[in-house]
Each structure stands twice: as structure tokens, then as C-alpha cells.
């Protein structure tokens, strides 16, 4: 050959030509280009000797295989851009040639691998294809050189090659990707440290890596083992084509990795065909891909709407839930602004505060109203988060929201139920208390009068018991309607409980305005209510308290209104009363009495007196009525007319009645022991017993403890329990009659008497109220009433007793009317236990 045997590609290119974008060829390649130029200037002799050395390498089998392997390795990892600007001299000693080509290529790979990590998978795949094309060209160039006469190696070149080989080892050790060069037999010709690390093998195991018997198992995505002949290197050897695939590999230490194998066949000339395989650990990439797929699925299937926008506010992506919640299709929102959802319910300050929060903290969450595509508004719970790029700057915004319209509607409904009466729809006690407090605050600022009205529906229980609770509920609803119509919109009407209502009147000029409203309310209830065909009459008792006249605090105002209500009811109902200090004094006395009464039983402050019930004709005592008396060390002697209503009002009457029952039966047992076996004892019972359990058991227990016959015990009742009726009252009275206890109706004639009830409950005696007896001397009407009541009892075979007989004329009058039993001061005054025992055991006991 007339020219030196060397191959140059673009020798005129600049020594620092780029390897891909922004990467430069290694310095030792630039030095090699300069060496080649100097050799060309020296003449043909040195060049002839260099090519002769290459001929010697060419005729050695192992050297040729190694050279082809280097060319294959170059094709796998070297970018074509680098090779296009690199001159390769083939007239150097063998080691120098090997180092020049391989070190340059591998060093370039070390630089390019950094860039490849930042590229997408598609960019990396394109680079790999370019690498193989360049490798094929370079390998063909090296192997096409023919044998030349042998020559002596240049000592300086050998020294340079030795240094370059050291650099080669350093570069290969720095590579992250594994490289394996295999012969057609499957034997490994060369590999780098990354391959051993990736497979988890030591150098000896890696050197023995054989394609037919790989030291690790390659598993497909399905978990099945991939046979060796189906691995990319074996497929390359079989069909001469490129192959790549990903496998799951378990290292000897148990670690599981996902590896990507990319194999390309190469021609080793004298050694036949080989294959170059690159091995990349794609575990992190697959995990990232899996997370991305999972995130994508989560976005697509999320029940919450998700919207991704640019920093300029352009919508990039929405999920199906967005379409479902807003009505907008994908093509209708992509590229548009989220402002198309604005409802107009929020002012500019709202959005300013929202974006201030996002810019300050990177997120905002709250409730917002937006507009559906169809035009209606919906409430949503919205969360907006800023997304930063790699440089820390905001690149996108992600909005996640859900429709909470139904939840807000339900919350509003629940809030209404929590603050309103379910039956009438009026504000309940809690809301009325809040409104009263607000009214009092306004009153203090504007110096206006506030009136608080407590209203109690008269005889509501009678309506319930007579017509049923359904009719009672209708009555409450219609009363609420009439009551609301009597006040202004600025006033408040509420239902406290049962038949109790409350009215707050605000901004009054004078106290008389409250009375005018009260009269208007009473007038509105004057006309009957039509309730399922029943004409029902009802009325209110109303108590009025004023702020600031009577009190300034809500607590005191409520207490005063309640006191006034009590006096309105005591005055005969269907009336209203203003609170006065006199009322307050009586209320305080009542509370003080209640306080002391609670300890009266335990402190032994109660005692019994007994008043005889006698026959008028012969004066024989048939029974003694037990009368309770209270002597308080603090309050002194308290009359029954004073403390009995207090006991009934606070519920102490039940315990009081049981105390009287126990001690009366005890005295009866003493009378029995002293021979007065025909005399009974009468005990008064409150109607409250018939609304509670335990009366029958208490009576039975007392009779058992005192060992007195039940027939000598008389229980005096008012007419109200009989009118209440119902299965509970019937069961109690029937149980008492079954024990043999006698039942007596007290104060007969002043209530709503029912002959059916008298017959049904087997009443033993009727006591005509003392008011009729005392008035019969003065009016003929009262005398006629007394005669009628006596005749009624006789016709029903019920004993009749005249109560309150205090004069002889009264005694003669009732006796003439046919009544043979009487009680009163004329027949015998109340007496203590000792006097009673002396009366009943005296020789003339049974006579006056």
C-alpha cells in the first residue's frame, strides 16, 4: 500500500467534537488524533512497521476475537456522533490500538450515561439504536484490514497503551450499566464490574457466566422462568437479529431486581458470531412506572373531581368525576380557564385570600360554590395544591373537589332540627334562649324594652287523655299557627316543651304593649279548634316579665316570667299577669318552704292528727281520717293548705303520702290491739301516684308490716285520676280493690263527675265537698245540689258522707236529705294519736 495503513473518519473534525448535546470527546482521543498526524509526516517506513504489527495481531485467533469484541462493545455503548468526529489509527501496537478504541468509547459512555439518566425511555432507546449502527461501521473498518509485513513495536506507543488500559479499567468500573460480550458457544469473553454487581455475582462467577447455563433465574412478568434459549443473547445468536426484554431476577442474597437486557449480534470473524449484551437495572424505573400507573388509575377512578392546570390557569387534565360533577366534557374544558365554573357567589376578596394562601403555603382548602354546566349552583369541598418542578418553581396546580351540596343540605336540616321543635316548627328552648340573649344585648344598646312571655296551654292534658295524642298534636300545631300570627316578624315565638310556649317581644315603647299582645293571644284562642271533627276549646295562662323593669339578665327574666305564669294559673287560667315584687316575695317563700319540707320527713317534723267520721243518727265512729301536720323549727307551724300545694308542685307529695300511710296504719294496728276493731283509717292520696309506679306495692307492703286488715284502710282520691282513665289507672284501682282496700272519692261534686267511672271502679264512698254543705243553709240551689248528690249515691248503692258539717242546722239538713255519715267540727275536731286512742277505747267510744 502506498499510503500508511490507517482508517480515518472525518479526520478534519475538531478534536472536541460533541458526544450528543453538551458532551465532549475525551482528551486522550484528541491526543491520539495528533499522534496519527505526526506519523503521517514521518514517512512510509514507520507506518509500514505499524501495520505489520497489526497483521501479526490479525493472524492470532485470540487477538482477532478480542479485537472484534472491542468493536462490538463500541457499537453497543458509543454514540455515532462521537465516532463521526474521531480518527482511529490502526498502525499502532496491539495494546495501543485496543486502548485507543476501547478507552475512548468507554470513557464516552461514562459521560453519556449521566446524560442518559435524565432522558426519557424513548430517547434512551433511540440512542441505543444509534450506538449499534456506529459500532457496526467501526467493527467493519477494523476487520477489513489485511495482513501487512511484521514490524517492531514502538516502545513509546506500548507505554502509552499501558496507561490507557489502566484508564480503561477505571472507566469500566465507573459504569452503571452492565456489559457482557459472549461467544457463539455462550462463553463470556468480557464483562465489566457493573454486570457482576447487577447480577450479584463475584468476579469468578461472572467469568464463568455462560448463556446456556446462566447463574441466575430470569423470570417473566407472569412469574414463569424464561428458558435460556429464549433470552435475548441466545435469540440473537439464533436469528442474527437484535432482541431486548425485561426480566425479574433474584440475586443470590435474595434481592429481587427488574433487568432490561439488550442484545446485538456481532461478527467475530475467525471466531464466528458473538453477541454483545447490555444489562440495565430498571427496578426503580418499573416502580416509578407502577406508581405512575397507580396514580393515573387513582385519578381516573377517584370519586372526587381532579383538575390539573398550568401556572397561567389553563386546564391540562380532568378526570371522569369532574365531568360527572360539573357536566362539562373533556373537550369542553381542556385549554380553558377554571373560571367557567364560577358561581358569582364569592367576591374578589374571597379569591384574593385564596391565592394569597396558595402563594404563601402552597395550598388552600375550603368550601366554595360553583356553577354546573346546566346552570344550577352546587357546593363543593375544594383543595388546591401547588406542584413544584425540579428547580423548586411552581409548574402546575392540582385541584381536588367533591360535591357537598347534599351534605350541606342535610347539615342545614339537622341544624334546623337541633334548634326547632319537630312538631310545630317553632324555635326550641335552645334557640329561644339565644334569641332572648341577643334581644337583651340590643336592649342595653338602644335602651328599649324587651318583654318575655311564658305561656301555658290550659287543660292540655285533658285534651290528650280525652281525644288521644294525635288530636293533642294537632292542637299544638294550630295553637302555634295562631300564636305566630299575633306577633311581629321581629318578635320570636318558641315551644319550650309539652304545652309550654315562649314569646320574646323586642323594641317596645312601654310595658302596656306586652299586655296588648297578651290580650290578642287570649282572643285568638277564644274560638274553638276543629280537630278531626272535634270542636276543642283552649286557652292560655300567660306570665309577663320586662327588661329592664323587672330584670336585666336572661336568667332572672325567665324566673320572673315563670313566677307571673304561676300566679296567672292560680287566678283561674285564661289570664295574664305581670310580674311584681310581691309575686317574687311569695315565690321566694315558696322556694324556702320547699327547701325545708325536703328535710321534714327525715328530721321528724311531721305528725298526724285524726278526725272522726261518724254516723249522724247515733254518733258511732266508723273511721278516722289521718291529717298531716308540719311543725318546722325555722318556719313554725305550717298549715296543710300551704305546704300540700308546695309538696305537689315539687313532687314531694308522693313521699309525704307514703309517710302518712305508714304511720296511719301503725296507729290503726294499735287501735285494733285495744279492741277498736270496727274502726277504719282514711288516708288521702295525690293524683300524682297514678302517673307513677309503685302505689300498689307500697300499700301491700304497709299492710303486711302493720298486720292490719285491708278492709279497714280507706284511700281518698280526687276525681281527676278517674277522669284520666287509661289502662294504668284502671289496673291500679282494680289491684287495690282486689286487696280489699276501700276507695273514697273526696270533694265530690266540684269536678267533672262521671257516673260511668263511679260504677266501673266500684267506689265505696262519696264525700260531698264542704263548700256545698256550708252554703246549703243560705241558698236553695246549694241545698238542692246536696240532695241530688245524696240521691245519686244512694241510687248507685254508694255511701255518701257530708264533709264540713259545723252547725246543727247543717247536720239536720243532710240527715233530712238522706245522708247518714258526716265529718266536721261539729262531729269532732282533729286530735292527736293519744286522744284518738282514748276516744276509741273509752266505754262510750262508739257514741258522741
Image (tube, grey):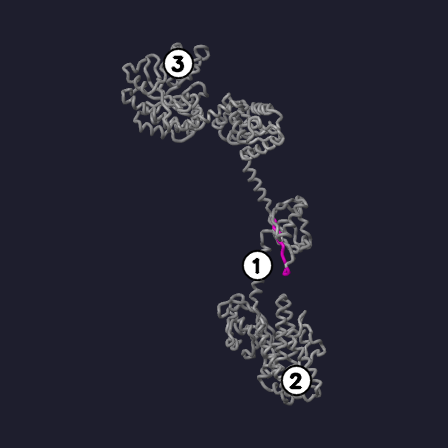
Residue displayed at 52% across by 77% down: 207
Q: Position of residue 76 (x, y in %)?
A: 61, 74
Q: Answer whether residue 384 is magenta in the image.
A: yes
Query: Of 721 and 165, which appears nearest the observer?
Result: 165
Element type where label 1 sits in the image: helix
Q: Earlier in the sequence, mark 3 or mark 1?
A: 1
Q: Which mark is residue 570?
A: none
Residue found farthest to the front: 634
User: Is residue 729 shown to the viewer in this render?
Assistant: no
Give the labeled residue for mark 1.
Answer: 294
Element type where label 3 sits in the image: loop
Instruction: Kindly indicate the quadrant of the structure image that contains residue 839.
Output: top left
Q: Answer whether residue 402 is magenta in the image.
A: no
Q: Residues within 10 Å of mark 3 (few under 14, many from 20)?
A: many
Q: Position of residue 754 (x, y in %)?
A: 44, 21
Q: Nearer the viewer, mark 3 or mark 1?
A: 3
Residue displayed at 49% across by 24% down: 585
Q: Which mark is residue 805?
A: 3
User: Is residue 28 shown to the viewer in this render?
Assistant: yes
Query: Of 472 and 848, which appears nearest the observer?
Result: 848
Name the quadrant of the C terminus.
top left
Q: Position of residue 592 (x, y in %)?
A: 45, 26
Q: Earlier in the sequence, mark 2 or mark 1?
A: 2
Region rendered in magenta: 382-391
Instruction: Kindly indicate the quadrant of the structure image that contains residue 86.
Output: bottom right
Q: Position of residue 174 (x, y in %)?
A: 58, 72
Q: What secondary structure predominates along the stretch shown in magenta?
A: strand
440 sits left or right of 591 in the view: right
Q: Earlier in the sequence, mark 2 or mark 3?
A: 2
| Spatial separation of the CA atoms under disc 2 and disc 1 | 57 Å
Give the labeled residue for mark 2.
Answer: 91
Instruction: Kindly indicate the quadrant of the structure image that contains residue 832.
Output: top left
Amino acid at each position: 500500500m502506498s499510503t500508511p495503513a490507517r482508517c480515518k473518519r472525518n479526520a478534519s473534525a475538531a478534536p472536541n467534537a460533541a458526544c450528543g448535546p453538551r458532551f465532549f470527546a475525551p482528551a486522550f482521543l484528541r491526543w491520539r488524533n495528533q499522534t496519527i498526524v505526526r506519523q503521517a509526516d514521518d514517512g512510509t517506513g514507520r507506518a509500514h512497521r505499524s501495520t505489520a504489527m497489526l497483521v501479526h495481531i490479525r493472524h492470532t485467533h485470540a487477538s482477532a476475537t478480542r479485537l472484534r469484541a472491542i468493536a462490538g462493545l463500541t457499537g453497543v455503548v458509543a454514540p455515532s456522533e462521537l465516532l463521526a468526529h474521531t480518527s482511529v489509527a490502526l498502525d499502532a501496537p496491539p495494546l495501543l490500538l485496543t486502548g485507543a478504541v476501547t478507552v475512548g468509547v468507554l470513557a464516552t459512555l461514562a459521560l453519556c450515561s449521566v446524560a442518559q439518566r435524565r432522558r426519557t425511555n424513548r430517547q434512551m432507546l433511540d440512542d441505543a439504536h444509534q450506538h449499534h449502527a456506529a459500532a457496526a461501521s467501526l467493527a467493519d473498518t477494523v476487520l477489513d484490514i489485511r495482513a501487512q509485513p511484521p514490524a517492531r513495536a514502538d516502545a513509546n506507543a506500548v507505554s502509552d497503551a499501558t496507561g490507557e488500559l489502566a484508564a480503561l479499567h477505571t472507566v469500566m468500573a465507573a459504569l452503571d450499566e452492565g456489559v457482557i460480550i459472549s461467544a457463539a458457544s455462550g462463553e463470556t469473553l468480557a464483562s465489566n464490574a457493573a454486570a457482576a454487581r447487577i447480577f450479584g455475582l463475584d468476579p469468578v462467577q461472572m467469568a464463568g457466566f455462560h448463556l446456556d447455563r446462566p447463574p441466575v433465574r430470569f423470570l417473566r412478568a407472569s412469574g414463569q422462568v424464561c428458558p435460556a434459549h429464549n433470552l435475548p443473547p441466545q435469540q440473537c445468536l439464533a436469528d442474527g437479529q437484535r432482541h431486548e426484554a425485561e426480566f425479574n431476577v433474584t440475586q443470590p442474597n435474595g434481592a429481587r431486581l427488574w433487568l432490561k437486557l439488550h442484545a446485538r449480534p456481532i461478527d467475530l470473524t475467525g471466531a464466528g458470531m458473538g453477541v454483545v449484551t447490555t444489562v440495565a437495572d430498571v427496578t426503580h424505573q418499573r416502580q416509578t412506572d407502577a406508581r405512575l400507573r397507580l396514580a393515573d388509575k387513582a385519578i381516573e377512578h377517584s370519586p372526587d373531581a381532579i383538575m390539573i392546570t398550568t401556572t397561567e390557569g389553563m386546564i391540562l387534565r380532568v378526570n371522569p368525576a369532574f365531568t360527572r360533577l360539573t357536566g362539562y366534557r373533556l373537550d369542553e374544558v381542556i385549554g380553558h380557564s377554571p373560571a367557567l365554573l364560577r358561581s358569582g357567589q364569592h367576591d374578589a376578596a374571597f379569591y384574593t385570600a385564596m391565592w394569597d394562601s396558595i402563594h404563601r403555603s402552597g395550598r388552600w382548602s375550603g368550601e366554595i360554590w360553583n356553577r354546573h354546566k346546566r346552570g344550577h349552583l352546587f357546593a363543593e369541598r375544594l383543595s388546591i395544591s401547588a406542584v413544584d418542578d425540579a428547580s423548586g418553581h411552581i409548574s402546575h396546580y392540582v385541584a381536588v373537589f367533591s360535591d357537598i351540596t347534599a351534605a350541606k343540605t342535610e347539615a342545614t336540616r339537622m341544624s334546623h332540627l337541633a334548634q326547632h321543635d319537630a312538631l310545630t316548627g317553632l324555635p326550641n328552648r335552645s334557640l329561644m334562649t339565644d334569641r332572648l340573649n341577643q334581644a337583651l344585648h340590643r336592649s342595653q344598646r338602644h335602651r328599649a324594652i324587651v318583654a318575655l312571655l311564658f305561656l301555658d296551654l290550659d287543660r292540655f292534658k285533658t285534651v290528650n287523655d280525652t281525644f288521644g295524642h294525635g288530636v293533642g298534636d294537632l292542637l299544638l300545631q294550630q295553637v302555634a299557627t295562631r300564636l305566630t300570627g299575633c306577633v311581629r316578624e321581629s318578635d320570636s315565638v318558641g315551644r319550650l316543651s309539652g304545652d309550654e310556649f315562649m314569646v320574646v317581644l323586642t323594641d317596645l315603647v312601654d310595658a302596656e304593649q306586652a299586655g296588648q299582645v297578651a290580650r290578642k293571644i287570649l282572643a285568638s284562642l277564644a274560638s274553638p279548634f276543629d280537630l278531626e271533627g272535634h270542636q276543642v276549646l283552649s286557652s292560655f295562662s300567660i306570665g309577663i316579665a320586662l327588661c329592664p323593669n323587672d330584670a336585666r339578665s336572661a336568667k332572672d327574666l325567665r324566673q320572673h316570667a315563670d313566677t307571673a305564669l304561676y300566679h296567672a294559673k292560680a287566678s283561674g287560667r285564661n289570664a295574664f299577669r305581670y310580674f311584681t315584687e310581691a309575686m317574687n316575695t311569695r315565690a321566694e317563700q315558696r322556694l324556702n318552704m320547699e327547701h325545708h319540707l325536703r328535710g321534714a320527713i327525715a328530721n321528724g317534723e311531721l305528725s298526724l292528727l285524726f278526725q272522726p267520721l261518724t254516723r249522724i243518727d247515733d254518733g258511732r265512729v266508723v273511721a278516722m281520717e289521718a291529717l298531716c301536720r308540719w311543725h318546722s323549727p325555722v318556719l313554725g307551724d305550717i298549715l296543710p293548705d300551704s305546704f300540700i300545694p308546695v309538696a305537689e308542685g315539687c313532687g314531694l307529695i308522693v313521699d309525704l303520702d307514703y309517710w302518712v300511710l305508714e304511720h296511719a296504719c301503725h296507729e290503726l294496728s294499735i287501735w285494733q290491739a285495744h279492741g277498736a276493731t270496727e274502726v277504719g283509717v282514711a288516708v288521702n292520696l295525690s293524683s300524682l301516684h297514678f302517673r307513677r309506679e309503685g302505689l300498689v306495692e307500697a300499700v301491700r307492703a304497709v299492710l303486711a308490716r302493720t298486720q292490719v286488715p285491708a278492709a279497714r284502710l280507706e284511700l281518698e282520691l280526687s276525681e281527676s285520676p278517674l277522669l284520666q282513665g287509661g289502662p294504668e289507672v284502671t289496673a291500679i284501682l282494680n289491684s287495690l280493690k282486689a286487696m280489699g282496700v276501700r276507695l273514697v272519692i273526696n270533694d265530690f261534686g266540684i269536678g267533672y263527675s262521671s257516673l260511668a267511672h263511679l260504677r266501673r271502679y266500684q267506689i265505696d264512698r262519696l264525700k260531698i265537698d264542704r263548700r256545698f254543705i256550708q252554703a246549703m243553709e243560705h241558698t236553695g240551689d246549694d241545698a238542692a245540689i246536696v240532695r241530688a248528690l245524696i240521691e245519686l249515691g244512694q241510687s248507685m248503692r254508694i255511701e255518701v258522707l257530708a264533709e264540713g258539717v259545723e252547725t246543727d242546722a247543717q247536720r239536720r239538713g243532710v240527715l233530712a236529705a238522706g245522708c247518714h255519715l258526716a265529718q266536721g267540727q261539729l262531729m269532732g275536731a282533729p286530735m292527736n294519736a293519744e286522744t284518738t286512742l282514748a276516744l276509741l277505747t273509752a266505754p262510750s267510744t262508739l257514741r258522741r
